[in-house]
Image: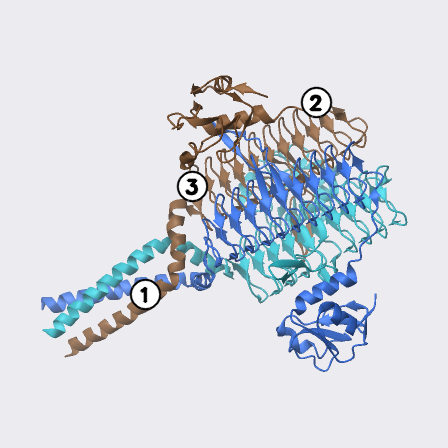
Chain colours: A cyan, B blue, C brown
Amino acid sequence: MKKTLREIAQYLGGSVSGDGETLISGLGTLDDAVEGQLTFLANPKYASKVAATKASAVLLGEGGNAAGKNAIFHPNPYLAFAKLLTLFYTAPTAPLGVMPGAFVAEGVKVGADVSVYPGVSIAPGVVLGDRVTLYPGVVLYPGVILGNDVTLHANVTVRERCRIGNRVIIHAGTVVGCDGFGYAPDGTAWYKIPQIGIVVIEDDVEIGSNAVIDRAALEVTRIRRGTKIDNLVQIGHNCVIGEDCMIVSQVGISGSTQLGNHVILGGQVGVAGHIKIGDNVMVGAKSGVAGNTAPNQVLSGIPVMPHREWLKSSGLIPKLPEFRKTLSALEKRVAELENELAKSKGE
Amino acid sequence: MKKTLREIAQYLGGSVSGDGETLISGLGTLDDAVEGQLTFLANPKYASKVAATKASAVLLGEGGNAAGKNAIFHPNPYLAFAKLLTLFYTAPTAPLGVMPGAFVAEGVKVGADVSVYPGVSIAPGVVLGDRVTLYPGVVLYPGVILGNDVTLHANVTVRERCRIGNRVIIHAGTVVGCDGFGYAPDGTAWYKIPQIGIVVIEDDVEIGSNAVIDRAALEVTRIRRGTKIDNLVQIGHNCVIGEDCMIVSQVGISGSTQLGNHVILGGQVGVAGHIKIGDNVMVGAKSGVAGNTAPNQVLSGIPVMPHREWLKSSGLIPKLPEFRKTLSALEKRVAELENELAKSKGE
Amino acid sequence: MKKTLREIAQYLGGSVSGDGETLISGLGTLDDAVEGQLTFLANPKYASKVAATKASAVLLGEGGNAAGKNAIFHPNPYLAFAKLLTLFYTAPTAPLGVMPGAFVAEGVKVGADVSVYPGVSIAPGVVLGDRVTLYPGVVLYPGVILGNDVTLHANVTVRERCRIGNRVIIHAGTVVGCDGFGYAPDGTAWYKIPQIGIVVIEDDVEIGSNAVIDRAALEVTRIRRGTKIDNLVQIGHNCVIGEDCMIVSQVGISGSTQLGNHVILGGQVGVAGHIKIGDNVMVGAKSGVAGNTAPNQVLSGIPVMPHREWLKSSGLIPKLPEFRKTLSALEKRVAELENELAKSKGE
């Protein structure tokens, strides 16, 4: 595909500076773009690279310095560039239908224009929406319901009766609807509590690779609309994750916890069970959230505290040996002073 | 299935209060149960909800307050409710045999009443016990031995010669018998140490999704009877995990470490290699266990300390900036005092 | 296979003490070896076990004490033993070809002597080198290129256009080339940034089970020659991991970070995005690396500090309650002193 700079600017709602007829045939980074490509500057830290790029044009924030290059100015250049990537590189492919080598139980409802690859297994009672793509090795247990435009990558497993909304993407190896980790002590042994609930994944959710979302014990584990979950994340049974959350890789959320909307959890964060985290909370990587958390905060640490406090406090941990030295020196000096004073009074 | 309250009480070994002829057709939570259902109160924190529930009866601890409802009293209502969930919701399904689309090597021994789904791969020399269920995508390498009543969910991999006991459940995507992470330095490069040992998983073990249990370098990585392992857990080569342990999600245990019986490790705990953890040790979430650990302790922190100590100490980390301020103020005041005293002595 | 002690010593480049004609038919540990086996002592901590072993001979470091046993002395007994394990236990198997039940698209290039098991899916445009082994459930998306002597264990997924070098081993369930976690804020929702780059895995890399290596947003996520990656590791998009690194289980490395050569990251370490870690850096388990890191250091802690400092500092965290007590006692004593001094001056 080729488009002029002017056409691209119109598509994005931006303004052109320089030669609007410049033909653009692809996209590249500031460092690696070649002639014929458009590049972008989202982070002002790299502004000095604009002059040196070999790209034929550059996409910049409004008021940015194009260094004499052909340019498009846009209020949100990062988002605009993402939209161009979609335009240039994500051509829809023709649906392949249910291919030979896929195992589809009798009575499964299959929507229009699906692609079901060889090696997919679909159990009785499953419903597939339109334009669903199931890569090889996907396993759908009985009664699973998928909406429209769902993509499940290779070797994804969805357990019985779980429901997945529209435009959901789940990456390879992820498991939706695994039994929650629930046991009742029975003497010294553990009695398994049957996990008879389900998982509901709402529209526009994306889940990374090798993540696990546990089914509820009795009711529903729910991932709300628009939330994005990274690789190797664990979501415990009965959790409710709000809308437009961002759960970074290797986070673990224990059972029955509720996240508000637009919560952001950094990599490797751990969240205790049976707690509530308010809207717009951001938690720094590797932190541990142990209790209920009011909305609109930035937190870090184990256990979490306000992020600025954490920066100050954690920076002092290496000073502890020095603190100890100062403390015991002070104790000696104070004892000395007390002695001297006692002596001087005794005199 | 429908049963009277009296029948249920007899099954559980509890006592009825109210109308024992009440028909129960299912189970629900205090909040969501409807007429005809039985609910339960295990946590006294929610006792106030009993009066408001729409359930037809409630299962309570002995001496609990049924708020005028039909009730069953039981010494362990949590365990009793789990047993009812099993009774009401886990009907055994008819065995399906080895289904078309499963790849079973010649000479594989297959027990009675198995269900082997399409897309399962079974290598030569494998032995399957009775009532084994293998979901699609399960891969058994050569010489794997499974006991009776084993369930392996979709896309589970069991590597060569590993042995799995009776009534073991392994959830989707988990890998048993992966090569341990062993290399010998050979100049600047790493020489792979062949991992020729196996994994033995004893009876009544359950392992979550996308977990990994490494095979031993030379001998056996062993998971003892009754232990429960959650999703995304890593168990290193040559580990021995005791009986009835509870290993919560995202725990990592390094190679050659031994856990006693009834050890409980919270989510995201890390355990160093070549150490021993005694019986009945509990380790709080996100902690790091670096050395041998005596039995019958509750520990937390990185590295671990007694849990109560950790609560006190970790709570003081945010106070470090204040400590520093106090310390340097004290230093000034002490220096001042020393000066004054010197002066007064000099006078 | 049987070999004399003398033959083995020659193979390894070591020297024999005792009866060089002793026949060795296998290998075992100091504790468990039986007659006819060779054992080894790599860790001097266990030197006392040499006298008690039932092995017919022992492999020792030069100058070690063979306690009267037949022995081979070698400058690097650990490496030597690893080479013997390879010799005794890793017989090459005859190639099986592309087996029935494998789904191979038209036009796929297949090298010599491959083994492609049933249930493997290979998309159009894939190239397989010689002696490639693909276990059941492996899924190769379009355009994937594998070198020679590559082994992909069961249920490994390699996404479109990713390239894998020679002698690479990837263990079961791992995903190479998953979409990176990239979204642009679009009001309160997240707009997916297409991840159109690839992953390149160079020669002699080994990757454990259920790990995830994300494809680059635009260019290349690269794992350089000889690096070893353990189970459940997350490598973010656009990362470059140097040569001969050792990345232990459950490590997470955020996007666009670069590791030098021979970097060792302990279990559960987290590394921030967009940073550089120099050659030969070692990071202790559970640590968090938040910024650029100079080469040739041993680091630990959250955030990291020199490892020795961390040992001292973290050991003082349990002392914080005591520090607080001492601090407030000192404050009182100093106030008292100030009072007394004021009084004495007023007199």
Bin the neighbour count of mark 3 within 10 Å (Cα to Cα): few under 14, some 14-19, many 20 and up: some
CB of mark 3 within 8 Å of CB of mark 1? no
Bin the neighbour count of mark 1 within 10 Å (Cα to Cα): few under 14, some 14-19, many 20 and up: some
Query: How far apart, in angstroms, are the residues tagged by discs 2 and 1?
Result: 73 Å
Dot 2 corresponds to which residue? C94
Of residues C37 and C77, the one nearer the viewer is: C37
Q: Which is more N-terminal, label 3 or label 2?
A: 2
- Both labels 3 and 1 in a single chain: yes
Q: Is residue A67 visible?
A: no
Dot 3 corresponds to which residue? C298
Q: Is residue C52 visible?
A: yes
Bin the neighbour count of mark 2 within 10 Å (Cα to Cα): few under 14, some 14-19, many 20 and up: few
Q: Which is more N-terminal, label 1 or label 3?
A: 3
Of residues B78 and C52, the one nearer the viewer is: C52
Q: Is residue A315 left or right of residue B93?
A: left
Of residues A83 and A181, the one nearer the viewer is: A181
- Both labels 2 and 3 in a single chain: yes
Which chain does tag 1 point to? C
Q: Quadrant of residue C331?
A: bottom left
Q: Mark 2: which secondary structure?
A: loop
Which chain does tag 2 point to? C
Classify the position of the C terminus of chain C by image quarter.
Answer: bottom left
Query: How far apart, in angstroms, are the residues tagged by discs 3 and 1?
Result: 33 Å
Q: Is residue B312 left or right of residue C253?
A: left
Of residues A280 and A341, the one nearer the viewer is: A341
Residue A147 image point, x, y percent: 81, 53
CB of mark 2 within 8 Å of CB of mark 3? no
Dot 1 corresponds to which residue? C326
